[in-house]
Image: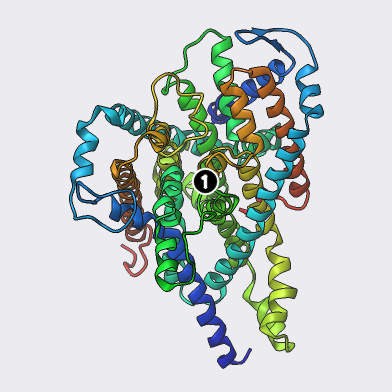
Amino acid sequence: MNIQLQILPLLLVLVLFLVAPVAIILAVSFWDYTEFSLIPDFVLTNYIEIFESGVTYSTYLNTFKFAFLGWFFTVVIGFTLAYFLAFHVRTLRWQIILFLICTIPFWTSNIIRMIAWIPVLGRNGLVNSLLLELGVIGEPLEWLLYSDFAVILAFVHLYTLFMLVPIFNSMMRIDKSIIEAAQDMGASSFQILINVIIPLCLPGIAIGTIFVVSLIMGDFITVQAMSGGQSASVGLAMNNKRALLQYPAAAADAIILLFVVLGMVAILMRTINIRKEL
Amino acid sequence: MSSKNRKTSFYILAAFFCLFVFFLYGPMFAIITLSFQGPNGGLTFPMNGFSAHWFSKLFQEQRVGDFQGSFSRSLTLAVIVMVATVVISLSAGMAFRKKFRFSNTLFYLTISSLIIPSILLTLGIGLLFDRLGLEGHWYTSGLGAHLTWTLPFGLLIMFAVFNRFEKSYEEAARDLGATNWQVLRFVLLPIIGPSLVGVGLFGFTLSFDEFARSLLSVGSKNTLPLEIFGMTTTVTTPTLYALGTLTTFVSFSIIAICFGVIVILEKRKKKFGDDSGKGLI
């Protein structure tokens, strides 16, 4: 069968719905605009305004903070879960069952999964009620919901799977005889973890990092929903400009964000060959 | 590793795993329970009676927005995306088994499609259709936007499948005189069938639940996730939870159906793929 024909549908979708939209955003980012209309032009004002505004830097700082904290918790939790599944669960059957238990929520709605935190973390939610009941706190904690804490919690809730899957994949590919060799040489479990397992899992960690970092860097909906509009992210700022019909300004934001995300991913990609890791 | 030491670490890790599962599912069960609130119940515990009141509201009340329309649109779109994802991923996955020019470029383009910020993509598609003077619809621009999200997953799964695929089965079939089509139909598809169902599962569920890439790309008629998100600011009754329970139920049903089909296909594979013990006839 003809290879060109086989890749044509994929290519068509990517050109029409990925390349063309990015191209038009790039073009529009140089356009001028008034309150009512877009004016095709070639001006740098959209970019200059972004770089001159102090808000940009604080927004990026906040987004990097989310990305770092989200990454940190997902990598620690994802690694621990994968380690348990790969090296402590003994039968393949149970490995599959437990793995699927972790995976199933991924196939349900992110929006619903965020809404689900409301009755848990809210002012009259389960956590506050429980803590009040136990006498740990005198009055409801306000920072549980609609806060940076809630945003990070939601990221961990939504994206740990993206870390767990590639790390688990890396662990399952580790030749058991390597670990046995380390044991025979007298290595403790901890030494095996540090000197054998973690180095061999780095490709999985890198793939997971690519997922989590790019998802968080481009996020706007989690930040908006979970911070109750009280925190900022680059994506959210962009969406706000878009809502004000300042398309060129939003487009310039988008292009800068794209460069930042692609730059981060390109650095990570240098460390691995994704096609071989699958 | 002494065996006693190993046991302690096992229990600690097992406890951590259970805690994570509780964290993963706890909130979901909270809203499923709360969606059965009595007519006077509120958005938080305690339960004030037990009823299907809020589910019936979902089907009556106009205030809930266009629930039924958006629901059927999302369902239809998810089915289209599912079929398209399976076909396109399989086709491209097969092409990637051989070397061809720009294969790396196409691969990295697909990866870019995955990692590109969704807000950027949906803005771009919205702008593109607007500038071309086309009206965006959920089944045109919306479909394209969803495919940019599902195809990378589909293709990555195909890579994983073909990396583990034993080529000699195909070669044997060809040696016995099978045509390309027969190899595909009688050798390849039965072997990778279960994985294709998995690709379909990704296609359906990712589309059915997609919010960010739908936002500016589906045109004037909302899909369900957009409708639900709109409701979070306007609806202050457990109707919201009822809707959440209903969509989660749809997702769970699809997952169950796909798993069922995968199990059946795997059984068939075992039954027909192995004639050991039958002797020579």
Q: Nearer the viewer, residue A217 or B263?
A: A217
Residue at horizontal 31%, vertical 67%?
B278
The percent position of residue B167, horizontal first and vertical second, equals: 55, 51
Q: Quadrant of residue B81?
A: top left
Asked if residue B188 shows in the view, the reply is: no
Q: Can residue A174 be seen at all in this image of the molecule?
A: yes
Q: Is residue A40 left or right of residue B172?
A: right
Residue B123 horizontal/vertical position (percent): 58, 24
What scheme was used to colour the molecule? Answer: rainbow
Residue at point 46%, 45% (across, down)? A110
**Residue ID at (41%, 32%):** B230
Q: Which residue is mark 1?
A: A226
Q: Residue at x 61, y 92 (%)?
A: B2
Chain of the residue that carries numbered disc 1 in the rendered image = A
Q: x%, y% of residue B7?
A: 53, 87
Given the image, on which type of amino acid does mark 1 rest?
Answer: Met
SS state under label 1: helix
Left or right placement of residue B221 versus residue A202 in this view: left
